[in-house]
Image (spheres, rainbow, N blue to C red):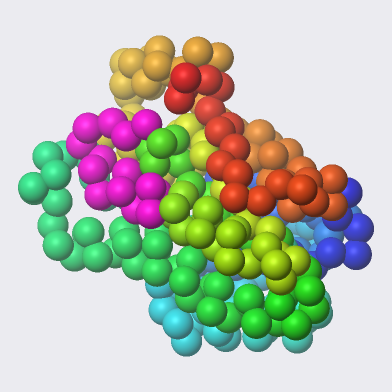
Amino acid sequence: MLENKVALVTGGGSGFGAGIARAFAAAGARVAVADIRAGAAREVAGEIGGVGREADVSQGASVDAMLRSADEALGPLDILVNNAGITHAPGPLEEVREDDFDRVFAVNAKSVYLTARAVVPGMKARGRGAILNVASTAGLSPRPRLNWYNASKGWMITATKTMAVELAPAGIRVNALAPVAGETPLLSSFLGEDTPEMRAKFLSTIPMGRFSTPQDMGSAATFLCSDGASMITGAVLEVDGGRCI
């Protein structure tokens, strides 16, 4: 589905990002894996025959260096996946520390601006491209105690739609995925404490009775970034087992 495509996945060293990177490679793409943890990026890249790069997606210079390096190694990008994300600890909205708020919006929101600034000119020049933002059910159906994380993912959904409208005439599609929580490094942060009781309580809110998996995300991402989805832009695909219903 992605033969001869060049893709870059941020936050690709673990969790959903690693699942997306593996699925892209299996579909024929050449994949750059970026992560703030250089070793994790290189490990996943080594598994799939890609390239691993260290990057802090909240910093413009780091983003520019990441994309320049990926271009030199693999060629111009056809696909960008903004998957890197963080959360703050659950708690009353007024008690979240300012530095935690700033970090959540720098990683979850500012990164989308920084990567767009770097890749959109080249995609426009080539008349094609696919950008996929990994949002969350939290941006569609917010729950208490993760207020500013919810808001950052709502921002990402709005950004996806406005990017899609503006970039469609240039041949660039922009979509988003909205997973429910999964077996990723963020799970314990979402739950507050990762205990069997907390997991059972959370799973009871998902009609299909399980978490989103990296494989679920990889399958959905591969479709949305393929030519088979050429008429789909501005969509937010819920990969959530029915939680948002």
Q: In front: 224, or 179? A: 224
Q: Position of residue 7 (x, y in %)?
A: 74, 64
Stretch in magenta: 141-155
Q: Position of residue 90 (x, y in %)?
A: 22, 39
Location of residue 45 by image quarter: bottom right
Q: Is residue 206 above or below residue 85?
A: above
Q: Residue at x 71, y 71 (%)?
A: 170
Q: Main secondary structure of the magenta part?
A: helix
Q: Residue at x 8, y 47 (%)?
A: 94
Q: Is residue 56 above or below residue 161?
A: below
Q: Position of residue 75 (x, y in %)?
A: 80, 79
Q: Residue at x 32, y 34 (%)?
A: 142
Outermost residue on the right side: it is: 3
Q: Residue at x 41, y 36 (%)?
A: 140
Q: Is residue 140 above or below residue 7?
A: above
In the image, taking residue 33 as reference, residue 184 lies left or right, namely left
In the image, taking residue 53 as reference, residue 188 lies left or right, namely left
Location of residue 220 by image quarter: top right
Outermost residue on the left side: it is: 94
Q: Is residue 114 above or below residue 133?
A: below
Q: In front: 216, or 43? A: 216
The magenta stretch spans residue 98: no
Q: Is residue 104 visible in the rendered structure shown here?
A: yes
